[in-house]
Image (cartoon, rainbow, N blue to C red):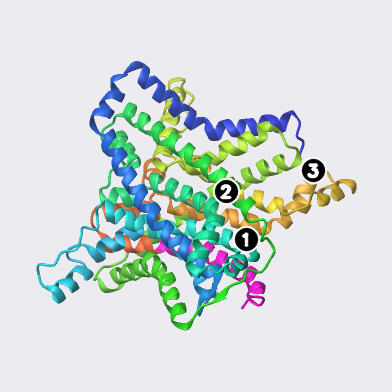
Amino acid sequence: MNLGIRSRISVSALGVLLLAPFVYLLAMAAGSLWTAPDVLAHLIDTILADLVVQTTLLCCGVVVLTSTMGVLPAWWVSAHEFSGRRWVEWLLILPMAMPSYVIAYAYTDAFQYSGFVPSTLRQLLGPGFRLPEIRSLGGAVFVLSFVLYPYVYLMARAAFMGRSPSMLDAARSLGYSASRAFFKVGLPVARPAWVAGLALVLMETLSDYGALSYFGVQTFTTAIYNTWLNMGDRASAALLSVALLAVMLGLIVAEGRARGRAQFYTQSGKGQAPLRRPLKAWQGWVVLLLCVMPVVLGFVTPVAVMLKLLVHVDTTVDWGRAGKWVWHSALLGVIAASVSLALAVFLAYVKRQRHRWWVGAVHRLVALGYGVPGAILAIAILLPLATLDRWTYALGLGLPAITGSVFALVYAYNVRFTSAALQSVDAGLSQVTRHIDESARVLGRSARQVLWQVHLPMLRGSLATGVLLVLVDVIKELPATLVLRPFDFDTLAVVAHQFASDERLTEAAVPSLLIVLVALVPIVLLMRQGARQSRPRADTMGH
């Protein structure tokens, strides 16, 4: 692969293609302010204050719960030895396979007035007993926290595992108790990783649409969707999108800086076996119970509720239609994952061959897509494509419409999810020493041959991880698919949302369970890989 003018043009064109929707969105917002400056004043007078309050309260609640459910179990499994630790260490990431809107449907069925939990409690405590409404801001905090805490858990666990064992030994020699050692030694070491995980949690919270719209919670994402599609006010939707995009950019920058500090803090203990302090029997059982609770509430319970709806309610499942939904979801996922992987390999290899500022800039700009809510992405892509369709029609070119096509959907998926594949490929290439490249070039191989004959075979694991991550993200994605999908081209996520919006939770159980089943595949593979990597360490644990 030649890094001459062709590669420079290819990388630049790719960056423009992936960033064009956001440039169009910014131009539209600026045009709205120029032609109708009263739009912004109208937003400030009507909904902006309420959106800020609701979004802030939601984010604060999710931060508190995800920090509690992520940091404490990460400390317990990395610093202590107790019965069941090896299993719970990886079971804690299972809720990552659960889309937020699926867990919202499950808990609504269980906790609504006629649900199993309130009905049982009324029988025990009297007919006047009432539970708080699950479809509320508090319910949204509860649901999102159980889905998103694994981001904090994984980052904090990596930081705790990477600490130097001598740090904890020094704390114990100074007479620190276990809890004081956590606050004085463990937590400061994990703080950068904790912040990086919280930044990811906040990005996912701000971009969520399915659960929040179902619960009737008004945040920026739901307001953008309603303002644009239900009210037809494109100018207000563009201004709200730009405001939320600015917040996302700040979170992406904060996450990148925190991740860099986290890597610095964990270098001192890299390669050393973690020393775990054995807990007393009763302490171990208490810790095990506390660690299992997020898994039970965030994965086991929603799956059980959906299975109950599927099995115990008298309904006929149209498996032919369900197979069609699976086919549509799998088709979009495979196409988007293949294109994303090709783009990721190209960008990562160009960056490896020669460091140039413009290559690094394209890398950083591509990473912005992952933090952009699907509702914003749908607006940013649909409007320019609609303009392009009008131009081609006016010119009489006879080209098929791009809007409402599979191409528009795949384009949206690649704008948002190429970053996931790129990070996986980058991580794999960083493990391949440059001496291998030099040796291959000495033997007469071109850069293209080195890629195909040397690097790609060595990157099978990273490539598979990137494909699986993009595939699962595409299958779970809702707002962009809801807006951009072709006519009569429903996916599992879209059908589950439509059934739940019509209060047909029984029918929503089938696509919801299929989504979880598909999403479990990469999670299980990640668990197996992590268990294999940690097994040698388990034999050398401290006492």
Residue drawn at x 75%, y 53% as measured from the top left: 432
- Quarter of the image with the C terminus is bottom right
Badge 2, how many Cα within 10 Å: few under 14, some, many 20+?
Answer: many
Q: Nearer the viewer, residue 459 or 434?
A: 434
Residue 336 locus on image (x, y percent): 53, 47
Q: Nearer the viewer, mark 1 or mark 3?
A: 1
Q: Is residue 444 visible?
A: no
Q: Earlier in the sequence, mark 2 or mark 1?
A: 1
Pick whichever of labels 1 and 3 is earlier in the sequence: 1
Residue reaching furthest to the bottom? 281
Position of the N terminus, as image quadrant, is: top right
Which of the numbered marks, if any, corresponds to residue 162? Answer: 1
Left or right relative to 443: residue 219: left
Q: Which residue is mark 2?
A: 259
Mark 2 element type: helix
Left or right: where 400 falls relative to 105: right
The residue lying furthest to the top in this view is: 35
Q: Which residues are magenta?
A: 514-543
Distance from disc 2 to disc 1, alpha carbons, whole Å, reads 14 Å
| 3 vs 2, front mark | 2
Most common SS among magenta residues: helix
Q: Is 340 on the left or on the right of 96, as rendered?
A: right
530 falls in the magenta region:
yes
Q: Is residue 130 visible?
A: yes
Amino acid tagged 2: Arg
Element assignment for label 3:
helix
Q: Which numbered marker is on residue 447?
A: 3
Badge 3 amino acid: Ala
Cα distance between the residues tagged 3 and 2: 31 Å
Look at 22% across and 70% down and name the residue there.
Answer: 116
The CA span between labels 1 and 3 is 35 Å
